[in-house]
Image: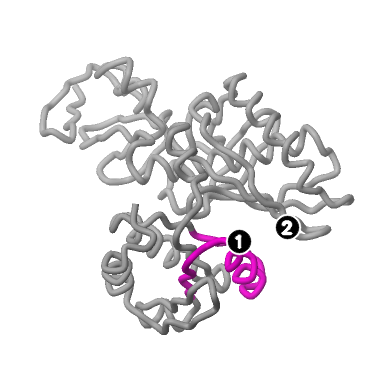
């Protein structure tokens, strides 16, 4: 007999081992359809993970941050599959979630262009509708930070998990940028529903700009903190020169929040206006308070 303790403290007993998805289905069909992963004794696992012993288990859905991150990570695999089908010469190098979305990096013989993104996004929509499974290939289940082989279509990808069980849950996504020449990155965004996607497409009042990949997580945390204060904020985490990103966003976004290694280590940000005025370094709480007082950029 296996005893499963759910987040509300209730106990469920099962006669034999069962997967996370089977547990979700035993609770309700709606939960099973929404499940993208599980948390077993605090460890994130795929829906196919087999529970063999007593455990505390919660079902992860896209409505929580971990679930949304899993959606984005899996969307990167679906992007890789779409590019492989449309551009046989493109060789996948890496891909993962990134801030509000995901990216994939490819080595190409012929550079892809922004016009190619339309066809690639269309192919991704077809793959989502076809409902392909994403399956873990290795037998053991290490910590979620360790890379594992996952199969989507006829290709194995070495990637950090967990991943969604099928592509059908990947519905609200869009591709928005491509960079590089013979080694290219394609960037996209992914959300749990189309309403969130449309909200993301609204013009931001603040753009958080990272210097390089080392500040990715810090810049994303800053963006989330600004949003919680009511500011419509986005983050540009692309692996491109910061001066290029600043010039691009200065044309349309009222305020830029720039983070580099000094800002990350010091726990502050550098703020400038669209007109180029340097507003100095501030702690993020001070930025939130200042924007609230001015009424600029507050939803």
Residue 243 belongs to the span the image colors magenta: yes
Q: Position of residue 292 (x, y in %)?
A: 28, 64
Instruction: Answer left or right for 285 relative to 105.
Output: left
Q: Nearer the viewer, residue 88 or 150?
A: 88
Secondary structure under tag 2 reads strand
| Image disc number at residue 238 | 1
Residue shown at 11% from the left, 33% from the top:
9
In the rendered image, the vertical position of residue 273 relative to residue 94, given as above or below: below
| Image disc number at residue 129 | none
Over which residues does the magenta segment extend?
235-259
Mark 1 Cα-neighbour bin, 10 Å: few <14, some 14–19, many ≥20 = many
Residue shown at 37% from the left, 63% from the top:
296
Q: Position of residue 282 (x, y in %)?
A: 35, 80
From the image, which quarter does the N terminus lie in? Answer: top left
In the rendered image, the vertical position of residue 288 relative to residue 32, given as above or below: below
Mark 2 to mark 1 CA distance (whole Å):
9 Å
Counting residues from the start of the chain, the first of labels 2 and 1 encountered is 2
Give the quadrant of residue 30. top left
| Image disc number at residue 179 | 2
Give the quadrant of residue 285. bottom left
Secondary structure under tag 1 reads loop
Residue shown at 56% from the left, 35% from the top:
137
Q: Nearer the viewer, residue 111 or 253?
A: 253
Q: Position of residue 29 (x, y in %)?
A: 32, 15
Residue 156 belongs to the span the image colors magenta: no
In the rendered image, the vertical position of residue 255 relative to residue 136, given as above or below: below
Report if the CB atoms under discs 2 and 1 are less than 8 Å apart. Answer: yes
Q: Position of residue 287 (x, y in %)?
A: 33, 72
Instruction: Answer left or right for 255 relative to 91.
Output: left
Q: Nearer the viewer, residue 269 or 48?
A: 269
């Amino acid at each position: 007999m296996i005893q499963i303790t759910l987040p509300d403290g209730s106990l469920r007993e099962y006669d034999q081992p069962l997967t996370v998805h089977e547990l979700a289905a035993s609770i309700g069909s709606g939960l099973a359809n929404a499940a993208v992963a599980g948390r077993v004794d605090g460890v994130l696992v795929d829906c196919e993970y087999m529970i063999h012993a007593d455990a505390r288990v919660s079902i992860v859905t896209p409505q929580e941050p971990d679930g949304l991150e899993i959606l984005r990570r899996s969307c990167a695999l679906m992007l890789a599959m779409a590019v492989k089908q449309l551009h046989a010469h493109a060789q996948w190098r890496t891909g993962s979630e990134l801030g509000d979305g995901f990216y994939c990096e490819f080595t190409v013989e012929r550079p892809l262009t922004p016009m190619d993104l339309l066809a690639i996004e269309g192919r991704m929509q077809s793959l989502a509708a076809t409902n392909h499974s994403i399956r873990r290939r290795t037998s053991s289940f290490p910590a979620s930070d360790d890379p594992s082989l996952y199969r989507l279509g006829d290709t194995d990808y070495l990637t950090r998990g967990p991943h969604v069980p099928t592509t059908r849950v990947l519905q609200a996504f869009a591709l928005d940028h491509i960079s590089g020449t013979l080694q290219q990155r394609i960037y996209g965004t992914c959300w749990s529903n189309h309403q969130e996607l449309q909200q993301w497409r609204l013009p931001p009042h603040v753009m958080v700009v990272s210097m390089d990949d080392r500040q990715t997580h810090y810049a994303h945390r800053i963006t989330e903190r600004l949003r919680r204060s009511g500011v419509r904020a986005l983050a540009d985490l692309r692996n491109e020169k910061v001066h290029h990103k600043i010039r691009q966003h200065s044309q349309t976004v009222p305020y830029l929040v720039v983070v580099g290694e000094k800002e990350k280590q010091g726990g502050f940000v550098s703020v400038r206006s669209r007109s180029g005025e340097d507003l100095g370094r501030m702690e993020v709480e001070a930025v939130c308070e200042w924007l609230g007082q001015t009424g600029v950029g507050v939803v």
